[in-house]
Amino acid sequence: MSKTAVISLALFVSVLGASPPTSADVATLAKCQKVFAREGGKFALRVIRSNLKCADEISDCQIQCEVGVFGPPCDANPPPCCDPDDTTSNSAFADCMTKAQGVCDEETFKRSEYEANKTERITAACSDLTSDELCGAQAEGLNFATLNAGCLALNPGYTRA
């Protein structure tokens, strides 16, 4: 942050009647805010990709069933046939869906790791802030209490006062 920006911020806050934050306070808040944005964006992208990977695996099996890869589709044929809504209708389809479920289970585990990594990085970056600076509505700071997401990400037991 440039010296001019720090001075402008200090003047703005002093006009409001509050004591101006020091440049270290602003730097600490900015660092925390940047990590929240970076890690939140990275987490969202990873979760979307993970969900798509699972959905693709399941859809591939269902489409193959519908086009007759695992045997004739049940729409126009009597059993034995392949019904994309019934994994027990065809053993080859059931095998495909079991493999797809395995991929989905792996992705579910990865998403929990992504969440833990995000929380760990944000906690480390924001550890110098007090709870009031981070979540409170009274102190100068990030005021995440307004949205609650930041406070809940760091402390699952957080409740808004």
Image (spheres, rainbow, N blue to C red):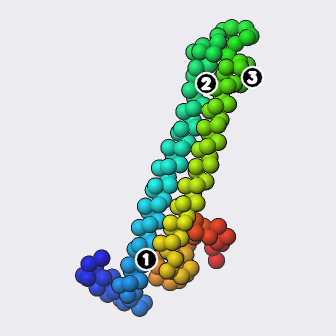
Disc nearest the viewer among 1 and 3: 3
Query: What residue appears at the point 50 percent right and 49 percent down from the top-left corner?
Result: 46
Tell me: 31 left or right of 101. left
In this rendering, the answer to whether 157 lies above or below 20 is: above
Where is residue 16? Give x, y as percent. Answer: 39, 87
Query: What residue appears at the point 64 percent right and 12 percent down from the top-left corner?
Result: 71
Spatial distance from mark 1 to mark 3, Cα to Cα?
Answer: 56 Å
Badge 3 amino acid: Thr
Please name the residue that numbered disc 1 is placed on. 29
Where is residue 75? Give x, y as percent. Answer: 66, 13
Question: Which quadrant would residue 5 be assigned to in this image?
Answer: bottom left
Q: Count all numbered tags in the image, as a single digit.
A: 3
Question: Which quadrant would residue 159 be assigned to in this image?
Answer: bottom right
Question: Which quadrant would residue 35 be assigned to in this image?
Answer: bottom left
Please name the residue that numbered disc 2 is placed on. 62
Spatial distance from mark 2 to mark 3, Cα to Cα?
Answer: 13 Å
Where is residue 140? Give x, y as percent. Answer: 46, 82
Residue 17 at least partly seen: no
Spatial distance from mark 1 to mark 2, Cα to Cα?
Answer: 49 Å
Please name the residue that numbered disc 3 is placed on. 88
Residue 49 at least partly seen: yes
Where disc 2 sits, the SS reads: helix
**Image quarter hosting the N terminus:** bottom left
Query: What residue appears at the point 64 percent right and 42 percent down from the top-left corner?
Result: 105
Badge 2 amino acid: Gln
Where disc 1 sits, the SS reads: helix
